[in-house]
Image: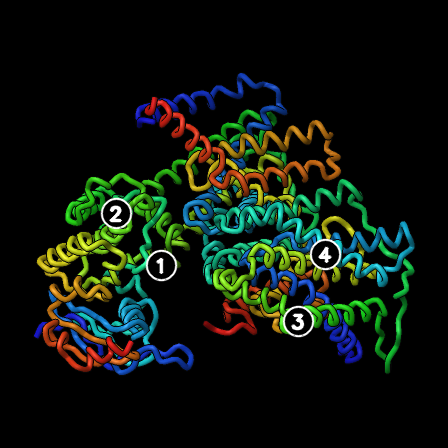
Amino acid sequence: MTPKQRNTLIVSGMGFALVLPFIVSNPSHQNYLILVLMFAQIGVAWNILGGYVGQVSLGHVAFFGIGAYTSTVLLVSVGLSPWIGMLIGGVVAAFFGLLIGWICFRFKGHYFTMATIAVAEILQVLFTNWEGVGGAVGLYVPLDQQGWWAMVFNSKLPYYYIALGLFTVTLLANWAIEKSFLGYYFRAIKDDPEAARSLGVSLTDYKLVAIAISSFFAALGGSFYAQKELFIDPGSVLVTSLSIKMSLVTILGGIGSLFGPLVGSVLLTGIEEATRQILGGSGMGIDLIIYATIIIAVAIYYPTGILGWAKRFLRRGKKAEDGA
Amino acid sequence: MNWDILLQTLLSGILIGMVYALVAVGLSIIYGVMEIVNFAHGEFLMFGMYSSFWLFTLFALDPLLTLPLSALFLFALGALVYRFTIKRIASAPMVSQIFATFGLMILFRGVAQFLWKPDFRTVENSLVSGNIVVSGLYFGIPHLVAAVGAVLATGGVWWFINRTRLGAALEATAQDKEAAQLMGIPSHWMFALAWGLGAACAGVAGVLLSTFFPIFPEVGATFSLIAFVVVALGGFGNVTGAFWAGIIVGVVEVLGGFLIGPEYKLAIVLTLFLLVIIVRPQGLMGRAE
Amino acid sequence: MNKLLVVDKLGKHFGGIVANEDISFHLDAGQIVGLIGPNGAGKTTLFNCIAGFYPPSEGTIRFLGNDITGMPSPKMAHMGIARTFQIVRSFGSMTVLENVMVGAMLRNKSVSIAHERASDELEFCGLSSRASVPASDLTVAEQRRLEVARALATEPHLLLLDEMMAGLTPSEVQEAVGLVKTIQKRGIACLIVEHVMEGIMPIADHMIVLDYGRKIAEGTPAEISCDPVVLAAYLGE
């Protein structure tokens, strides 16, 4: 794809995204679009650490939850606008990410992943027992104020545009990182840590940079979730299943690629919504079985995700053409 | 402070710790041989529990009697899991390995929910029930039996690895699979054996727990996490280390729950895990490189 | 004397096993020093200690007058010591050019400047035509040269080359010899661990010979090649 073709594609994609909610007017379908963008956004956040640097965190829900709790607590207690609360939550999460990184980067590979799960589980227990933030009951976003400043709306439309904005900002940040020296260093660390060290790349320093950025953006997603659902509790914003989902959309779409999380989110959120509607919410485990089958199939057959597979497919097609 | 209660707490921690050790030994064997962390380990335990529950409920066979049957069933399940999923990702990137076993975890929970509903179930009035009192200390007979059974099983695994030819072959594969392959030890069979054995350990622990622990599809989650902590503490691929680490974790959990509050049990154990990582990344009983 | 690297009474133990003991030598700016010895003589261990791969058990290493003993490898790279690996470690998901850019970014974080610097080094190492190829697609000889280009991009004073000629055909060895000579012309000193004698003898200014973890001889290639101690060590292998 030439740069010009790519730009055309991106601009038309953006235009399509802007008018999409007018084509899709059914609120439940609009809700699906919002979910797609939200999971794509936190997928991109996860991808910065998990995809580019190759540090597979399955405790990222901790940062998401910190974002959700920070903005909501600030809103409930002092009436601070979620827009500001969101940024504060991001910064808090980034610092928390630095702390977690300092602890967990001592472990490599699978054990790094386990350590991150442990962190998120600890956080879930603490928040469940912390009465000051609603404990197991959770927190409700007050509905007395509505509109853009309070980030509370009656219709789905504004949420859609906020989700689109957040996704775009996160994607642009990721793009800027990919194009800067950080992107090169991140990939070098993932490909061969020892060689990267010999070229002056401090593994811990740059992994910490990555986890701080990654947790900042994951927290933004958390604040948005709180405003969209108008309710949070440890069971919804601090569960490991959410960590799995944000990584899974990325892996399904294409790990370490810019648009992988979006592609993965469209598909995975779609499958989830479809099973929910067909099975009527009761599930009885069939939803889990479908979900798990996808995970295992991707892990075994498509480790590079849909985008990686598509790229190979296109290249093969091109080779065949050249050969003819 | 009431010393009797403290002593009682300590003892119950040691007893449950012995069961944790058995679960962790299974995890440790799989990691030791393949360097893959089995995130679905707790689900093997869950299947062990259900196998015990159904044999008891449908055929009135006591868990104590059906234990070998459950062990065999879990061994077969573990080997099959290896054959049909793990074998394909044995040399895949780490991300694929993590997600394959994570996928298995979700799959097994889904299957359990689908087959047996998300209800809590219990094995009631089995052969092992009631209490005994020894010099003012209460022992739940199921707990006692579970602990003794777990120690015997852990000892059996230790014996198998250290005293049998097949165990030696497994150990050789864990040390250096290319060299072992050259000496005529087929890696794939050893990997299958490790998965079978690992699953059987978790399954036996599940059966032992089934006489006093509620049974439900997500029961494995906590046990997986605890087993990770035990393995991290005991050093990877180290049966004796896992045994002592299991007891430490059991005591810390029960004592922490007693002193701080039972709702913090899991958080306390996981905090212990993180603290150990900070101080000794090679594990409490692992040797420094 | 303009001493670049001074190794003084260096020792390295692994548990009870002594890999290096009481090794002292020095290297001047712009000099090529060859480090040779039979298999298991401790060459790789010494090399790895100097490269900051593991900390020595005893002794000191000084570079440009600074004590760098036990310094982690990223810091060493900043000091001006670059290395290659015996078993090539290229960044497989990146192109050849991008590999070298990672090295160039040590001195300047600007991507466009790194791009220029990297292109220059690829030109220097004769890999320009392969710039946009994935690094994993290169031949072994090309991957070795890529490692050199990547190390040179960090603008080192000292280049540590770990068996860069192992497994190469005779004509590839000649190319590698030529490359090392041109590196020396840029004023960069080289410490070369080498098994291929015809590769190292013609270019080294000075040779260090190890056996059983100790230094058994040093001198010019001519002196070394007729030293009875060295001959005995090699024949007794």
- Would you call the spot at circle 3 few (<14 residues within 10 Å), some (14-19), or many (20 or more)? some
User: Left or right: A146 with respect to A304?
Assistant: right
Q: Amino acid at mark 4?
A: Leu
The subunit letter for the residue under badge 4 reads B
Q: Taking the image as drawn, is residue B260 in sight?
A: no
The reply to whether the C-beta atoms of the residues labelled 3 and 2 are less than 8 Å apart is: no
Q: Quadrant of the N terminus of chain A?
A: top left
Disc sitting over residue C101 in the figure: 2
Q: Amino acid at mark 3?
A: Trp
Q: Amino acid at mark 2?
A: Met
Real-space Cα separation, disc 2 to disc 4, in angstroms: 50 Å
The residue singled out by tag 1 in the image is A194
The reply to whether the C-beta atoms of the residues labelled 1 and 2 are less than 8 Å apart is: no
- Tell me whether marks 1 and 4 sit on the same chain: no
Q: Taking the image as drawn, is residue A264 in sight?
A: yes
- Would you call the spot at circle 1 few (<14 residues within 10 Å), some (14-19), or many (20 or more)? some
Disc sitting over residue B45 in the figure: 4
Tell me which corner region of the image, top left, top right, bottom left or bottom right, holds residue B239.
bottom right
Which of these two is toward me, B42 or B156? B156
Q: Nearer the viewer, mark 1 or mark 3?
A: 3
Does dot 1 land on a helix, a strand or a loop?
helix
